[in-house]
Amino acid sequence: MPKVLVTGGLGYIGSHTVVELLEQGFEVSIIDDLSNSSLDILDRIESITEIRPAFDEIDLKDKAKVLAFFKSNNDLTGVIHFAASKAVGESVDKPLHYYENNINTLIHILNALKNCRQQNFIFSSSCTVYGQADTLPISETAPVKAAESPYGNTKQVGEEILKDLSQIDENFKTILLRYFNPIGAHKSAKIGELPIGVPQNLVPFITQTAIGIRDQLSVFGNDYPTPDGTCIRDYIHVVDLAKAHVVALNRLLNKANNSNYEIFNLGTGKGSSVLEVVKSFERVSGQSLNYRIAPRRQGDIISAYADTTKANNELGWRAKYSLDDALKSAWLWEQEIRKNS
Ligand code: WQD
């Protein structure tokens, strides 16, 4: 069985990707520093798949430990790199933490990867790199715009590092996956999104409001130039996203004569406004949601949704779940994790 390293494999998207990899016959090794997750997720992955992947608690900022790991795991056939800090607002307050935790760690891994016979690397990127795109839907050829946060800049810098590496080493093959807005949870309701503190993202704030942890959802602005005045995003089910990583890894492993540096947008291709998400949630949950219209949130772009042509036709992947499916799974997960609290 091909062996793959998943960094950040106990995180939200990472854990869902580990499940899909295990179910498709990969041997998985996880590195996570547990700064934004817990070992309980490893138990939950095992309870879903009946396989307990190898796990090492390593801080990827520790260059020596990263090197030691790769030297003792030089039979790795690929790396899927999720581990990073990802809160836009926090990155504005702590830019150096973000550059150290997102860039230094990437460099440590790429340096150590040279010890492996195969250098196949999948990078977790984000539609954030496009900023407010001039054309919608957004294709991979859309220009990368000046980052509006240190977090967004770490994604752009990470992409540039990978591009430079791919140009000087044909044995280094990489695929950049630019996620739109991941939401939802595994159908088992054993893994899902676990924001620490007050959720910054829309869907966990909705589910926490519905279950009574938050009093009221603030809809950040309804005076945007959109049909109902609220911002539009492309909300993609996290399981669809996880499956795309397995497809991308197989693309790297099958040694076809693709470019050794490829970019794919991962979205549903459908834009949904904040109020449409609220109405969809109320429909699938049967819960009336308490919300108010609040002032705009600084830094929000008006509208972003993916042109999925390249992912559908070249990667051979397509999102299958609807917004309703994803919100239903998010609601079941919220109810599940609050059962025992
Ligand atoms: C979506 C919409 C908000 C919360 C961010 C990062 C992106 C990626 C996903 C990491 C916006 C509105 C939100 C709330 C609201 N993260 N909203 N009330 O900002 O599109 O993307 O998370 O990779 O890089 O930028 O997602 O869920 O925060 O916001 O009205 O309490 O919901 O204004 O229009 P966003 P989001």
Image (cartoon, rainbow, N blue to C red):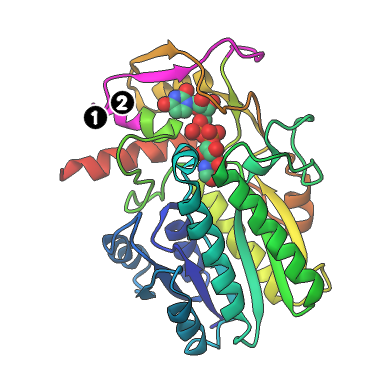
Q: Residue at x 57, y 39 (%)?
A: 149
Q: Residue at x 45, y 57 (%)?
A: 16
In the picture of the structure, the residue carrying the numbered disc 1 is 213
Relative to 189, say whether 130 is above or below.
above
Label 2: few (<14), some or many (≥20) within 10 Å? some
The residue range painted magenta reads: 207-229
If the image is split into quadrants, where does the C terminus sit? top left
Q: Is residue 226 magenta?
A: yes
Relative to 247, say whether 95 is above or below.
above
Q: Tell me: 122 left or right of 258.
A: left
Label 1: element kind? loop
CB under 8 Å between discs 1 and 2: yes
Q: Tell me: 105 left or right of 119.
A: left
Q: Is residue 166 magenta?
A: no
Relative to 27, say whether 333 is above or below.
above
x%, y% of residue 225?
66, 13
Q: Amino acid at mark 2?
A: Thr
- Closest to the observer, 115 or 230: 115
Q: Amino acid at mark 1?
A: Ile
